[in-house]
Image (cartoon, rainbow, N blue to C red):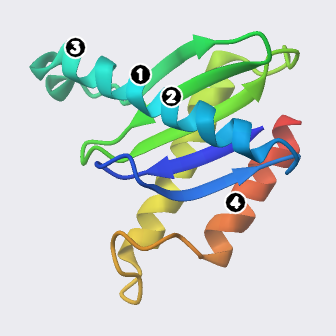
Amino acid sequence: FLICVAIRANYPLYIRSVPTQGELKFHYTVHTSLDVVEEKISGVGKALADQRELYLGLLYPTEDYKVYGYVTNSKVKFVIVVDSSNTSLRDNEIRSMFRKLHNSFTDVMCNPFYNPGDPIQSKAFDSIVSTMMVQAC
């Protein structure tokens, strides 16, 4: 299970994976999925800007993982990578996880001591991500 937050330039501000072994493979998966998000955003163009739907759904499945995407109005990208064998997570649960992640990210951005573009080191954000990971696994 992996959660990633990236800004416009596809620079990850936050990456957390459980288990931590094989983290390099997760990084590759994240960067590949960020490219897929870019394709979806540019392919839809202005139609996406007009919609209120921020959830991109399943970006692509692999043998081992399912990769889901979400993009905010300010082009911040969220990626969740779930083990393919995990069939208990439904689409609406993934959607609500992205909403929680987005709300928590907004709280981080509203912190006057946070410099936009810096890696996220908020304990509150980290605890929300940990809770989501425990619930999903």
Mark 4 and 1 residues: CB-CB less than 8 Å, in contact?
no
Task: Check disc 2 and give the amino acid type.
Answer: Thr
Q: What numbered label is drawn on residue 115?
A: none
x and y percent of residue 90 in the render? 72, 17
Residue placed under numbered mark 1 in the picture:
36
Nearer mark to the viewer, of 4 and 3:
3
x and y percent of residue 121 in the render? 59, 76
Crowd band around label 3 with a 10 angstrom C-alpha radius: few (<14), some (14–19), many (20+): few
**Helix, strand or loop for disc 1:** helix
Q: What numbered label is drawn on residue 128?
A: 4
Q: CA gap, disc 4 to disc 3?
A: 32 Å
Mark 3 and 1 residues: CB-CB less than 8 Å, in contact?
no
Name which of mark 2 and mark 4 comes first in the sequence.
2
Crowd band around label 2 with a 10 angstrom C-alpha radius: few (<14), some (14–19), many (20+): few
Name which of mark 4 and mark 3 comes first in the sequence.
3
Mark 2 and 1 residues: CB-CB less than 8 Å, in contact?
yes
Q: CA gap, disc 4 to disc 1?
A: 26 Å
In the current view of this chain or complex, which residue is farthest to the left? Answer: 46
**Helix, strand or loop for disc 4:** helix
